[in-house]
């Protein structure tokens, strides 16, 4: 049935581990997944690989199985966790020996840590000349990943995805880790799992790839998946074959649903069709209510978090930090690390350099964290996602203010909602050199309004590179007080000339809104 019922110890059977491969772009995730897939004993018997369904099982020579999630990148991993679906048992972190630890490697480490799943390091491309695994090991050390070779407890395997070196060893390492985790599930109950991918197929209708986690899913079962429902018309495995059933850790395509559920949503078997409809209708209603509530409440996550802290239910303030330079992100991490008290701790889940991306928003959402932008802004997509998901993004340019706000959160007191109010943005379309006046930016106001007397910042690729006052604000040849969205204008900064096409100008007012 639905969540809740526990299994007796005797009903639990070993199940295959579910593995996500993560790493920096071009370090060989795809190549490694492909190579591992080719080692599958069962696939050879089935006459090759015919299907791509977002997850697949590899059967090793000794008969053991491993399930790999083949969903793209860290986003999918975190998106699922954000929905409360802990589908992954462990992460294989791919690090190219010739490139070492890179930003997305660090991001992957933080994602794995936040999810609380163990990590196995795969040092890839060891076939290349002159590569030295020691370099990778030492770089990982800086991120508190200590491999066995350096006396730690993280398994490390050297591989070459393209030359097929070390694949058996990697599979063994995964099995060993799985043994330590004692992965077990009861196959003799109604199936439960998580949607890991879904689509609307022209010929087949809604198709959800589901990873079964408990029990067994069978054709003919009545299921609810997210807010959709249906009777399982067919199950298709990762080799494109129709199957009658799928047990724990088995990925299958499920056909017969009323609509397309989202990745990360749970799928459960229920006793009959009327129950399936009933739950589906209830969930559809909840989805609508939630959407409506999100529109009115806006920043739900912060208010909720502070309420939980006040009630003594939350013991931690989690923070994700993005800054313009490494020095700032480190300084903030250190400063915040010293905050907290006996009741509530502060935990920095991730700190990095650059714009706030969708991946950051997802990490913050999955962990109920506050997202801090220090002299950087969110990408448009990240901002939209944060608004939609109720993630609190806070922008700062003074470290003391970050610390001050987090300190207030630790005490369960609502920090000022905004220290600054963004009132407008303008995009620079052209730059004119004017004698005696310096560089004038020909802009279009893209959001809100820009006003004389406000604070102004120049953003380049989402990073704050200058803050100051305006020298001119003009429409055609006339000085004006303000320019609203949709209109073009000329702007220049006082005593500052380094402005370029594609830069953005941000206009803000400082106003401290008191706590509720
Ligand atoms: P992804 O972005 O992490 O999925 O990386 P890909 O799997 O697409 O690999 C990026 C590039 O590295 C491709 O050109 C691969 O052929 C190459 N590559 C991947 N693994 C190896 C390896 O073990 N040795 C060498 N020499 N090249 C590799």
Image (spheres, rainbow, N blue to C red):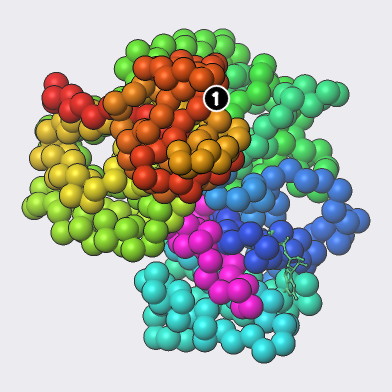
Q: Residue 7's x, y, as percent?
A: 42, 43
Relative to residue 425, is residue 122 drawn left or right? right
Q: Quadrant of residue 454?
A: top left
* 416 to 457, vertically: above or below: above
Q: Residue at x 47, y 12 (%)?
A: 288
Q: Is residue 234 magenta?
A: no
Specify the quadrant that holds the C terminus.
Answer: top left
User: What segment is highlighted magenta in the picture?
Assistant: 86-110
Q: Residue 104's x, y, as percent?
A: 53, 59
Residue placed under numbered mark 1 in the picture: 444
Q: Residue 234's x, y, as percent?
A: 76, 30
* 382 to 203, vertically: above or below: below
Q: State the residue lying farthest toward the front.
A: 436
Q: State the residue lying farthest toward the right.
A: 47
Q: Is residue 89 magenta?
A: yes
Q: Residue at x 51, y 23 (%)?
A: 489
Q: Quadrant of residue 335?
A: bottom left
Q: Residue 250's x, y, as percent?
A: 65, 47
Q: Residue at x 65, y 23 (%)?
A: 260
Relative to residue 11, is residue 97 drawn left or right? right
């Amino acid at each position: 049935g639905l969540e809740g019922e526990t299994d007796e110890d005797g009903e639990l059977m070993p199940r295959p581990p579910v593995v996500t491969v993560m790493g920096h772009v071009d370090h060989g995730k795809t190549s490694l997944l492909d190579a591992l897939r080719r080692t599958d004993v069962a696939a050879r018997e089935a006459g090759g690989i015919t299907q791509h369904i977002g997850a697949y099982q590899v059967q090793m020579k000794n008969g053991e199985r491993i399930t790999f999630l083949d969903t793209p990148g860290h986003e999918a991993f975190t998106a699922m966790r954000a929905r409360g679906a802990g589908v992954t048992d462990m992460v294989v972190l791919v690090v190219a020996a010739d490139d070492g630890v890179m930003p997305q490697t660090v991001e992957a480490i933080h994602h794995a840590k936040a999810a609380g799943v163990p990590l196995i390091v795969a040092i890839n491309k060891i076939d290349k000349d002159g590569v030295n695994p020691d370099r990778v090991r030492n770089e990982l050390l800086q991120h508190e990943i200590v491999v066995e070779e350096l006396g730690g407890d993280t398994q490390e395997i050297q591989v070459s995805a393209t030359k097929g070196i070390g694949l058996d060893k990697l599979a063994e390492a995964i099995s060993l880790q799985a043994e330590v985790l004692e992965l077990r599930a009861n196959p003799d109950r109604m199936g439960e799992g998580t949607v890991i991918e879904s689509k609307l197929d022209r010929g087949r209708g809604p198709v959800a790839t589901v990873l079964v986690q408990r029990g067994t899913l069978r054709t003919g079962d009545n299921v609810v998946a997210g807010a959709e429902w249906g009777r399982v018309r067919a199950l298709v495995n990762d080799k494109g074959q129709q199957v009658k059933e799928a047990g724990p850790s088995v990925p299958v395509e499920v056909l017969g649903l009323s609509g397309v559920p989202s990745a990360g949503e749970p799928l459960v078997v229920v006793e009959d069709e009327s129950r399936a409809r009933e739950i589906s209708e209830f969930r559809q209603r909840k989805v609508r209510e939630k959407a409506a509530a999100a529109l009115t409440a806006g920043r739900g996550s912060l208010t909720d978090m502070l309420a939980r802290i006040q009630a003594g239910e939350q013991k931690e303030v989690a923070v994700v930090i993005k800054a313009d330079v490494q020095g700032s992100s480190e300084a903030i991490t250190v400063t915040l690390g010293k905050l907290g008290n006996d009741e509530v701790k502060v935990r920095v889940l991730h700190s990095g350099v650059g714009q706030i991306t969708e991946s950051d928003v997802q990490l913050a959402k999955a962990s109920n964290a506050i997202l801090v932008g220090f002299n950087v802004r969110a990408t448009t997509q990240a901002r939209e996602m944060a608004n939609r998901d109720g993630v609190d993004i806070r922008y700062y340019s003074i470290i003391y203010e970050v610390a001050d706000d987090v300190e207030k959160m630790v005490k369960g007191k609502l920090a000022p909602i905004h220290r600054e109010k963004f009132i407008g943005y303008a995009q620079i379309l052209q730059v004119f050199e004017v004698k005696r006046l310096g560089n004038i930016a020909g802009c279009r106001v893209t959001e809100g309004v820009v006003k004389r007397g406000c604070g102004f910042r120049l953003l380049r690729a989402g990073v704050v590179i200058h803050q100051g006052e305006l020298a001119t604000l003009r429409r055609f040849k006339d000085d004006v007080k303000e320019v609203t969205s949709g209109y073009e204008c000329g702007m220049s900064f006082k005593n500052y000339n380094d402005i370029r096409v594609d830069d953005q100008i941000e206009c803000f007012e400082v106003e401290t809104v008191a706590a509720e």
